[in-house]
């Protein structure tokens, strides 16, 4: 098992990781994070989603945004 990485304070495009949240399902093995967009909205994203840029499709990101 790989060591857990604290992403708090790290930036992924327009998102900054605020804090770790409890997982919503036991099926996902990666940590869930609360993030804040540059626009001020917040969203939840799993570590693998942040690193894979799947977060681009959350409500706060404009369509086609790849900042």
Image (cartoon, rainbow, N blue to C red):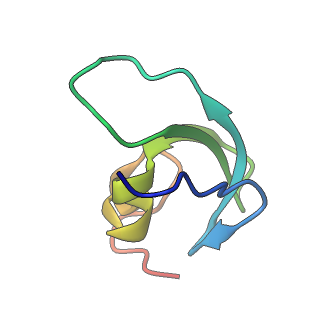
Where residue 56 appears, as percent x and y from the top left, is: 39, 62
Residue at 54% across / 21% down in the picture?
Answer: 22
| Residue 42, quarter of the rendered image | top right
**Which residue of the protein is positioned furthest toward the left in this rendering?**
27
Q: Is residue 4 left or right of residue 9?
A: left
Establish if 20 lies above or below 51: above
Give whichever of 10, 14 is nearer the camera. Answer: 10
What residue is rendered at 33% in x and 74% in y? 64
Give the residue displayed 28% in from the left and 18% down from the top. 26
Task: Answer with left or right where residue 3 lies relative to residue 35.
Answer: left
> How far across and down, in percent of the image, does residue 32 sit?
49, 36
Q: Position of residue 4 (x, y in %)?
A: 54, 51
Pick whichever, 43 or 45, lies toward us: 45
Q: Position of residue 44 (x, y in %)?
A: 51, 37
As drawn, is 61 to the left or to the right of 9? left
Between 60 and 53, the one lying in front of the other is 53
Q: Residue furthest front?
A: 1
Give the tally of numbered discs.
Answer: 0
Q: Quadrant of residue 59?
A: top left
Residue at x-position 57% and y-position 40%: 33
């Amino acid at each position: 098992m790989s060591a857990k990485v604290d992403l708090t304070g790290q930036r992924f495009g327009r998102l900054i990781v605020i804090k770790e949240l409890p997982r919503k399902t036991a099926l996902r093995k990666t940590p869930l994070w609360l993030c804040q967009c540059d626009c001020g909205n917040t969203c939840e994203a799993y570590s693998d989603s942040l690193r894979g840029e799947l977060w681009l499709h959350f409500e706060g990101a404009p369509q086609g945004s790849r900042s």
